[in-house]
Image (tube, helix red, strand yellow):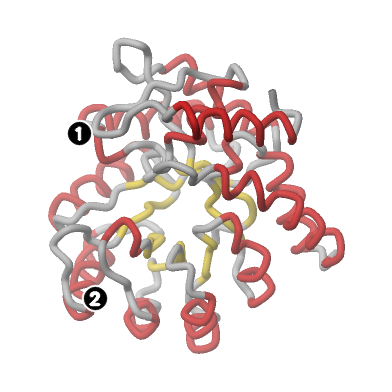
Amino acid sequence: MFKGSMVAIITPFTTQGLVDEEKYRQLIEFQIASGTDVIVPCGTTGESATLDYEEHDRVIKICIEQVAKRVPVIAGTGSNSTAEAIALSQHAKEMGADGVLLVSPYYNKPTQEGLYQHYKKIAETVALPQVLYNVPSRTGMNMEAKTTIRLAEFANVVAIKEASGNITQSGEILAAAGDKIDVLSGDDFLTLPLMACGAKGVISVTANIMPKEVKAMVTAIQEGRWDDARKMHLSMLEIHNAMFIESNPVPVKTAASLMGKCGADVRLPLVDMQPATLEKLKGVLKSYKLI
């Protein structure tokens, strides 16, 4: 259902710490003009963890309004509270989202059965396509392939954003349930190998600053131009790695700021980049002729 080059879009803030709606709309237009297939607001890269409920809904609403049905919008509505995830998802549905992205519950570290019951409850309650999101480095626990395969039986559980870094695990999902659930890469540097195994695309961080290039590589894979795709994949490895020299989304937001796209402001406990890593980032951006 959702495929191709998808961006986990940043949420720009003003110097006063408020959501910068004007810059946000401009970022959305930049993505659409660059060929991005799906916009994903309020993910990790969108700093959902420090948006209050009103801001969270507002950011999703602005995205839906600005996109105006030109591409799908998958709203980040996950929570470590099942009831809260349901409430956020229902509101996203009411606002017109095309789907929701549901990060696995963080901090409380449920068992695999707890994970299953969490997603089962949301699937049975919210009539909207749902993308599971497995990111152990953020949540403190891994959703195993067997749990994803169980959840694939729900018709509205349409995909999983796999950011475990475990290609074998993604392959197990595809082998057992690839006809029921799509795998989406959650790591830019694994997009090519995962799509080679059958993944349908990427929810990308790098696409915030290089949307045309990410789209071009995904398109090359879709068209079976593997030599072209491999060259593009290898050429972008350095920028992918640079997006994580400090905690995401600090580097990508700083990069967007250096490119004149928006401010670099982030919310505590995130802070501005340290001088040494900032200089490294600038060097990488210059090498890609982005600044």
Residue closer to the observer: 72 or 262: 262
Q: Residue at x 40, y 77 (%)?
A: 152
Q: Tell me: 206 left or right of 55.
A: right
The residue furthest top is 16
Q: Amino acid at mark 1?
A: Tyr
Residue at figure coordinates x 35%, y 11% from the top left: 15
Q: Nearer the viewer, residue 62 or 148?
A: 148
How many marks overall? 2
Can residue 205 be seen in the rendering of this structure? Answer: yes
Q: Position of residue 290 (x, y in %)?
A: 70, 28
Q: Which quarter of the rendered picture does the N terminus lie within?
A: bottom right
Q: Quadrant of residue 126?
A: bottom left
Depth check, front residue: 220 or 82 = 220
Q: Look at the numbered disc 1 and give the secondary structure of its residue.
A: helix
Say which mark, if any, is on residue 242: none
Q: Position of residue 44 (x, y in %)?
A: 37, 45
**Pointer 1: what residue?**
53
Instruction: Give the quarter of the figure containing the C terminus.
Output: top right
Q: Residues within 10 Å of mark 1 (few under 14, many from 20)?
A: few
Residue 37 lies, in percent from the top left, at 62, 46
Seen at 49% across and 85% down, the residue is 172
Mark 1 or 2, nearer chain start = 1
Question: Residue 206 location in percent, x, y?
Answer: 59, 43
With 44 as the anchor, is 1 left or right in this view?
Answer: right
Residue 158 in sight in this render: no
Quadrant of the image occupied by residue 113: bottom left
Mark 2, residue position:
116
Under mark 2, the amino acid is: Tyr
